Amino acid sequence: MSMKALCIAAGLAAAGMTPTVSALADPLGQPAPAFALPLRGGSAPMSLEQLRGQVVMVNFWASWCGPCREEFPLLDQIYRKYKSAGFTLLGVNVEPDTKDAEGFIAGTPVSFPILFDGDSTVSKLYRVDGMPSTALIDRHGVLRWVHRGFKPGDGDEYLSQVRTLLREK
């Protein structure tokens, strides 16, 4: 359980309420919520279903997020290294206006697909409560790992998780 979830649970308990794990925990081990979002460049929307059979990392980000700016080059390295092994990475921008996202990408270019979740529909499905947030989905479409935030050293965990899922069939 995340630190935020623990704080929420403690607050509920202090108020005399019983927190439920299902309300606080990620739906790990369950099918990842399906979605289709507009792809940068104006081409047809990209759906999670199109990527079945691949290991998919979904990274939720915003232009105003400092840790996102730090994380993007690392994510692009992972994408470039493992895309030929059946891995893809989707950068999902959560801002209502794509102008700021385009400016961010101009300053921090990446080779992985960028999608736009301007109304936060997909962000809500994935229980995104901070930036950046990252979900990892296995080849069968099951949500296997969620990570919130980014700090130096997190890249090692990203690599470990990606490699583990790529070894699975």
Image (tube, rainbow, N blue to C red):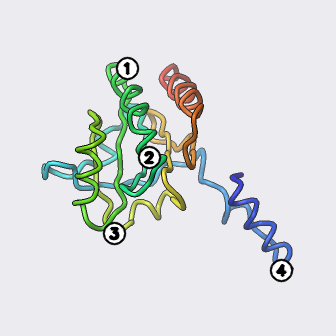
Within 10 Å of disc 3 (Cα), the crowding (few <14, some 14-19, many 20+) is few
Marks 2 and 1: in contact by CB < 8 Å?
Answer: no
User: Total label count?
Assistant: 4
- Between label 1 and label 2, give the one nearer the viewer: 2
- Separation of marks 1 and 2 at Cα, in angstroms: 20 Å
- Separation of marks 1 and 4 at Cα, in angstroms: 49 Å
* Residue at the spot 44% in from the left edge and 60% down from the top edge: 123
Within 10 Å of disc 1 (Cα), the crowding (few <14, some 14-19, many 20+) is few
Q: The residue tagged with tag 1: helix, strand or loop?
A: helix
Q: Is 21 in front, or is 80?
A: 80
- Between label 4 and label 2, give the one nearer the viewer: 2
* Residue at the spot 39% in from the left edge and 56% down from the top edge: 62
Point out which mark residue 158 bears. Answer: none
Q: The residue tagged with tag 3: helix, strand or loop?
A: loop
Amino acid found under the numbered disc labelled 4: Ala
* Residue receiving disc 1: 81
Q: Is 168 in front, or is 45?
A: 45
**In the image, residue 44 lies at what x, y percent?**
15, 51
Instruction: Determine which quarter of the picture holds residue 51.
Output: top left
* Residue at the spot 57% in from the left edge and 40% down from the top edge: 151
The answer to whether residue 16 is above or below residue 7 is: below
* Residue receiving disc 3: 119
The numbered mark, 1 or 2, whose residue comes first in the sequence reads 2
* Residue at the spot 27% in from the left edge and 59% down from the top edge: 100
The numbered mark, 2 or 3, whose residue comes first in the sequence reads 2
* Residue receiving disc 2: 68
Q: Is 74 in front, or is 115?
A: 74
* Residue receiving disc 4: 15
Marks 2 and 4: in contact by CB < 8 Å?
Answer: no
The numbered mark, 4 or 2, whose residue comes first in the sequence reads 4
Instruction: Determine which quarter of the picture holds residue 73.
Output: top left
